[in-house]
Amino acid sequence: MKYLTLFLIYSFFGVGIEVFFSSIKDYIRYKDIAFRG
């Protein structure tokens, strides 16, 4: 049971970090478009 909880925590943080970085990339792209346009 302990390993299952650890696995869930790690998978949750992995997805959170992935979404975080993708949102940062989208923000940078949007900023570039706004800055140029």
Image (cartoon, rainbow, N blue to C red):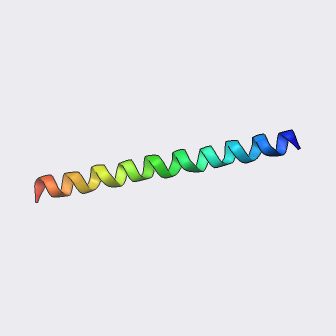
Q: Position of residue 25 (x, y in %)?
A: 36, 50
What residue sits 22% from the left and 52% below the top? Answer: 31
Q: Residue most toward the left?
A: 37
What residue sits 83% from the left and 45% below the top? Answer: 4
What residue sits 31% from the left and 52% below the top? Answer: 27
Q: Residue most toward the right?
A: 1
Quarter of the picture holding the N terminus: top right
Left or right: 3, with 12 as reference point: right
What residue sits 44% from the left and 46% below the top? Answer: 21
Left or right: 29, with 24 as reference point: left
Left or right: 27, with 14 as reference point: left
Q: Position of residue 5 (x, y in %)?
A: 79, 44
How many marks do you count on the picture?
0
Q: Position of residue 30 (x, y in %)?
A: 25, 57
In-front residue for pair 18/4: 4
Q: Residue most toward the bottom?
A: 37
Quarter of the picture holding the C terminus: bottom left
